[in-house]
Amino acid sequence: MPNESVKFDRAVDYYDQTRGFPPGEEAAVGALIARVGSLSASSRVLEIGIGTGRIALPVAPHLSAYYGIDLSRGMLERLRAKQNGEPIYVVEGDATRLPFPDNTFDAAVAVHVFHLIPGWRDVLRELGRVLKPGAPLVHGWSKRDEGYQSLWDAWNAALPSRPPDVGAQWRETPTFLEDEGWQPVSEEQYHTYIVERSPLDVLEGARQRLWSSLWRLTDDEIERGAAAMQAAVEALYPQPEQARQFESAFIVRAYLPDIVFR
Ligand SMILES: C[S@@+](CC[C@H](N)C(=O)[O-])C[C@H]1O[C@@H](n2cnc3c(N)ncnc32)[C@H](O)[C@@H]1O
């Protein structure tokens, strides 16, 4: 198992285009996180793996200060270029060693990051240290649009020995914090929205390795996966270039640290 975190330098130029929420949805996502994390105008918050600020920019207007840490300088530079007066302060660094004193933050935020960090349990320990007593971690993740699952099923069937995620396993996203002893203090809260995408876009994105789970595959594996996906596209979609609408969901849940971290 690789022992290095997956840093997003190679995704800097396309991350916002391929991962951003559809226009108009960001504000609802920001409000949802603020509500689930009980954030107020005086809150000081830390996001680990802040990236280009997809989450930070809409959450920051709800609070006093939003700190973020990321391994990728390029991702942080993108965030800075988009910042427009929001109280966001970033540091280039590793979430397994947080450069902040104990009991600093009123909440932490983590979205799409634990599966990228081999030392994710160290991150949890660090979050337990820097959170004030009673302060939650707001964990967020997206549910892939169901519509194209059959395309990925075809891809996966062609590559049965795909490497596992380097960190917490993505398929365990809804449960691993509880398994580690963190206590859920909210239900899972959903924000649903429509994504428009054509089957050919999905295939082309896979060929271009847009998703980090594809970065470690060999060229031969990418070719095999893409050939299987292309066959599924041709079988299922007579007009594969035509965009279709899919209901997607962004899910958040708040947790309190395991008492052993204190
Ligand atoms: C999938 S992106 C998510 C960015 C943002 N949270 C969002 O939802 O758009 C994951 C980010 O985590 C960063 N990252 C990966 N391992 C990290 C680590 N050990 N410490 C800090 N950041 C890390 C990557 O560089 C990348 O910018």
Image (spheres, grey):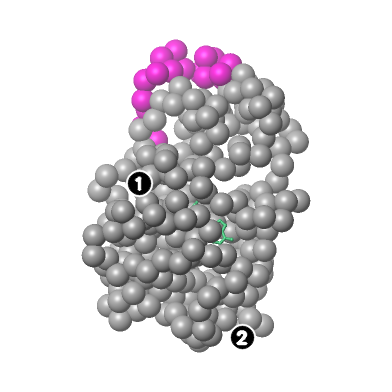
The kind of residue tagged 2 is Arg
Image point (66%, 49%), residue name: 165
Left or right of 131 on screen, residue 170: right
Picture coordinates of residue 84, whole percent (x, y): 24, 60
Instruction: Give percent across and percent down for residue 171.
Output: 62, 50
Q: Quadrant of residue 56?
A: bottom left
62 to 24, vertically: above or below? below
Query: Do labels 2 and 1 touch, CB within 8 Å?
Result: no
Residue 64 on the magenta span = no
| Disc on the earlier residue, 2 or 1 | 1
Magenta-drawn segment? 230-247
Q: Residue at x 53, y 75 (%)?
A: 99
Image quarter of residue 246:
top left
Task: In the rendered view, tell whether residue 247 sits above or below residue 169.
Answer: above
Asked if one can make out residue 257 in the rendered structure from this viewpoint, the answer is no
Q: Which mark is residue 262?
A: 2
Helix, strand or loop for disc 2 = loop
Write down the residue under mark 1. Answer: 21
Observer-nearest of 214 and 137: 214
Q: Counting other residues with Cα less than 10 Å from the Cα at mark 1, is it few (<14), some (14-19), or many (20 or more)?
A: some
Alpha carbon of mark 2 to alpha carbon of mark 1: how far?
36 Å
